[in-house]
């Protein structure tokens, strides 16, 4: 079986139609030959981005999301998580904040190394599952 | 709300000012409307797939509780309780489906100091087990399908004797079953043991219990329902009856109230027996007794201990807001109506509009590009969809309910035909063409259709 050519306009058009029909917001395919990203806008028009191969040293933003519903705490009282100065380099195991449910504080880890560039939720705000909390720029 | 309120102890009395709606779609909209009209605040919850739901914007609070999978969101008891605590909700309305008939959920809600808007856990458990439900109904004088009110014994000879006493054909059912699953019809004695073995295996796999029971299988029954409303002070009323015979694979497609052609002197005693049964088991809130009706006789099949999808047809004929009444009952208020006050008038139909292919019934997900819904006197549409709404593949395909009310059944049929002709939903496949065809069908027009009619009608239609 031959590999699908994701740079073929006909393939991209087919995938775009399929995504639009299924109401799927977007798709990203990574292959050894490169990367294809299709984003279907609310008006039904697709934005297509493709690069034949990721450029070494390029930067891509990644969101850190709430793992459950609760109150968002930027930093623990002990000061173990500092986000006062942004941007800030972090490693994957760093705790960026907490979700508080009653007396329990659930740490929110960065998950990957990079640079925290944005704080996306307000301190002490109630956030739902999956709410974006931080943006990290990851070096590829 | 201040973050610290999570630590407060929830009120132990029945009064509450905020209701968390543990459901989605049209019923979330319907419950939100009832709460708002009662001056109550609402908390809408959603999965990731429903983040853009319009009812989220009109709720006082809106919280995503989990991923798109229902098991991790709408069926996640812990996530729902957590959402209630975070938002300060004093009560949880389960709607229908999902956790609405889950006795364990009702119990943990009440143990958390919140009010479960529905019957208590023991009522749900009693009625959820078909054998104990039948026993309770027989004790209250509600007519049941011929067959013992006990589980099938293991002794093959004893089972054969029971089946012979009932008379073939018989139906073997899982005690914990529902939704048309876990049942087999046996036409003759030679097939009995094989059917029992298969159903027992299915019951164990699907419902976690191998317990079975046996009943007479009725050949051409109609599906008739009686709606009840009860308070915690021992008062109960029945709000008339519905016919839900128009079913495909045990899923209702069209419902109507009242059930056509059943004399008041036949159904009246059955309605009163249902009310009596509610009093005997201390039932609270709304509930539905489901019956098979054949040759002028009623046979109890099960009780649904929740709000039904088809509750609007009873609201249209009785003039009562069933969802508001349910919430008031959960608050501990006495019923505002007596049986003498319940006067059902006119005739009402409900069509379930599903996002599905009208020929092969496969669910249809996608974006609604164009939407025209009918309006006018005696026309009601319960829905959560709008132009641009994305129908998710994760959940039930019901996207709306079209309800009409008119002085007579014939006039209500005309009104439904007219309303269906004015309904347009573009961008996805729907069953609108099937519904339009059904309302042109002569036998349905005469009110003579049983629960097998739609399946046969579809077969003939497919053969043409």
Image (cartoon, rainbow, N blue to C red):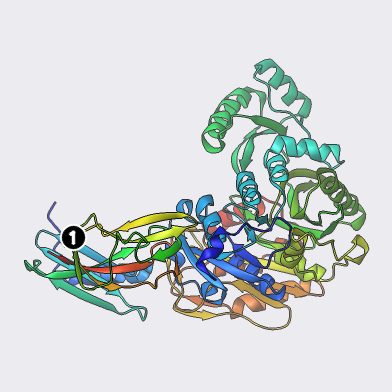
Q: Secondary structure at mark 1?
A: loop
Please tell me in which quadrant of the rendered image residue A95 appears. bottom left
Quadrant placement of the N terminus of chain B: bottom right
B261 lies left or right of A85? right
Residue ID for mark 1: A113
Q: Please report the residue visible at 64 percent of the width from the left and 19 percent of the height from the top.
A: B154
Residue B149 x, y percent position in the rendering:
76, 31
Q: Is residue B20 above or below residue B140?
A: below
Residue B364 makes an appearance in the image: no
Q: Please report the residue visible at 76 percent of the width from the left and 48 percent of the height from the top.
A: B291
Count of all numbered marks drawn on residues in the image: 1
Residue B123 makes an appearance in the image: yes
Residue B143 x, y percent position in the rendering:
83, 41
Between B115 and B172, the one nearer to me in the picture: B115
> For the view shown, which residue lies furthest in the left direction?
A56
Q: Is residue B260 above or below residue B168?
A: below
Q: Please report the residue visible at 74 percent of the width from the left and 39 percent of the height from the top.
A: B133
């Amino acid at each position: 079986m031959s590999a699908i050519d994701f740079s073929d306009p006909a393939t991209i058009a087919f995938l775009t139609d399929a995504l639009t029909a299924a109401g799927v917001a977007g798709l990203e395919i990574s292959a050894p030959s490169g990367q294809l990203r299709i984003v279907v806008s609310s008006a039904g028009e697709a934005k297509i981005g493709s690069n034949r191969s990721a450029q070494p040293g390029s930067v891509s933003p990644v969101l850190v999301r709430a793992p459950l519903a609760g109150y968002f705490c930027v930093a623990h009282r002990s000061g173990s998580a500092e986000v006062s100065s942004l941007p800030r380099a972090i490693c994957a195991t760093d705790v960026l904040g907490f979700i508080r449910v009653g007396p329990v504080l659930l740490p929110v880890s960065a998950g990957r190394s990079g640079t925290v560039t944005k704080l996306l939720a307000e301190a002490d705000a109630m956030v739902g599952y999956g709410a974006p909390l931080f943006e990290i720029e990851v070096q590829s | 709300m201040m973050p610290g309120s999570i630590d407060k102890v929830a009120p132990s009395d029945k009064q509450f000012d905020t209701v968390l709606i543990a459901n989605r779609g049209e019923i979330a909209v319907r419950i939100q409307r009832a709460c708002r009209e009662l001056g109550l605040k609402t908390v809408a919850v959603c999965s990731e797939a429903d983040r853009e739901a319009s009812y989220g914007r009109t709720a006082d609070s809106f919280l995503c509780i989990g991923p798109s999978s229902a098991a991790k969101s709408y069926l996640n008891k812990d996530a729902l309780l957590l959402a209630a605590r975070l938002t300060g909700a004093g009560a949880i309305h389960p709607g229908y489906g999902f956790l609405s008939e889950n006795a364990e959920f009702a119990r943990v809600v009440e143990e958390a100091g919140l009010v479960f808007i529905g019957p208590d856990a023991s009522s749900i458990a009693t009625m959820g087990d078909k054998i104990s439900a039948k026993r309770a109904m027989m004790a209250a004088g509600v007519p049941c399908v011929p067959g013992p009110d006990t589980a099938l014994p293991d002794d093959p000879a004893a089972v054969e004797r029971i089946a012979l006493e009932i008379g073939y054909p018989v139906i073997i059912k899982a005690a914990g079953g529902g939704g048309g699953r876990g049942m087999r019809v046996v036409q003759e004695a030679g097939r009995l043991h094989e059917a029992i073995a298969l159903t027992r295996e299915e019951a164990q796999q699907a419902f976690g219990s191998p317990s079975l029971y046996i009943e007479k299988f009725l050949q051409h029954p109609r599906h008739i329902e009686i709606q009840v409303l009860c308070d915690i002070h021992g008062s109960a009323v029945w709000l008339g009856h519905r016919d839900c015979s128009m079913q495909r694979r045990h899923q209702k497609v069209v419902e109507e109230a009242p059930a056509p052609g059943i004399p008041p002197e036949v159904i009246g005693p059955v309605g009163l027996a249902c009310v009596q049964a509610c009093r005997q088991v201390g039932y609270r809130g709304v509930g539905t007794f489901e019956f098979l009706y054949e040759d002028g006789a009623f046979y109890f099949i099960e009780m649904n201990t929740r709000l039904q999808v088809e509750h609007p047809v009873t609201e249209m004929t009785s003039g009562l807001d069933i969802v508001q009444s349910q919430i008031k009952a959960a608050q501990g208020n006495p019923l505002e109506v007596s049986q003498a006050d319940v006067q059902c008038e006119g005739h009402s139909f409900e069509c379930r509009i599903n996002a599905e292919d009208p020929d092969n019934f496969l669910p249809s997900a996608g974006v609604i590009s164009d939407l025209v819904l009918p309006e006018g006197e005696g026309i009601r549409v319960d829905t959560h969809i709008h132009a641009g709404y994305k129908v998710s593949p994760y959940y039930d395909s019901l996207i709306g309910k079209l309800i009409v009310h008119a002085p007579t059944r014939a006039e209500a049929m005309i009104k439904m035909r007219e309303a269906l002709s004015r309904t347009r939903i573009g961008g996805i496949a729907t069953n609108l063409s099937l519904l339009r065809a059904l309302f042109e069908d002569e036998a349905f027009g005469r009110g003579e259709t049983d629960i097998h009619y739609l399946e046969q009608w579809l077969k003939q239609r497919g053969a043409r």
